[in-house]
Amino acid sequence: MSADFATERTIMVDSQVRPQDVTDLSIQDAMRSVPRETLVPAGKSWLAYADAEVEYAPGRWMLRPRDVAKLLQGVRPKAGERALAIAAPYAAAVLEAMGLAVTRLDGADLKSVEGQWPLIVCEGAVEEVPPKWLAAIAPGGRLVVIERKGPTGAAVLHVRSEAGLGSRSLFDCVAPVLAGFEARQGFVF
């Protein structure tokens, strides 16, 4: 029996994205068109549209559709913009469907970000945002990432303006911490 993924995409948007106050129609339309099942490992396509994180590589997770949609709505992508997607296969595909030029960083060293980017999206949690990520935000640019210390976290938007770097929490989120981004254990004196 073959799955009807187009129907599953529509149901995903209607049941997981729209009810979470994601009102940006360009995000909804892009999510309806991106074949999420092609981004998960073989044998896990049945999980592609579930309300769950899906591990696509060891220690790397594709976020719940709701969380990706809310991250993107918070960062307000614009067609024609350049974007860097860090460990973010689904967010990258949605941004491309929205008309952005996306560079994907999903290699061994995710902490080494080079250049200046108008838009940076990370589809995973970190306990602390690497300083190189913050330094890579272009003037007027935005970075959105889930910051998680302990059992819960929050999606945080970082914005670089003429006055400097500012940040604000967008929504609470419990996402797995990316491998290599856990807090270092140590003693407190």
Image (cartoon, rainbow, N blue to C red):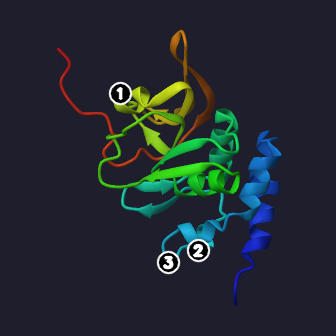
Q: Which residue is mark 1?
A: 131
Residue placed most toward the observer, 15 or 7: 7
Residues packed near mark 3 inside 10 Å, few (<14), some (14 to 19) or many (20 plus): few
Q: Residues within 10 Å of mark 2 (few under 14, many from 20)?
A: some
Q: Along the polypeptide, which appears first: circle 3 or circle 1?
A: 3
The residue type indicated by label 3 comes to Ala
Q: Which mark is residue 116?
A: none
Looking at the image, residue 35 lies above or below residue 76 = below
Q: What is the CA distance from the residue labelled 2 to the residue labelled 1?
A: 35 Å
Residue 149 seen: no
Percent from the top left, x then y, of residue 63? 56, 52
Q: Give the residue type at disc 2.
A: Ser
Residue linked to disc 3 = 42
Residue at 30% across / 54% down in the picture? 108
Determine which residue is flagged by label 2: 45
Number of marks in picture: 3
Q: Is residue 142 shown to the viewer in this render?
A: yes
**How many angstroms separate mark 3 from mark 1 (CA)?**
35 Å
Q: Amino acid at mark 1?
A: Pro
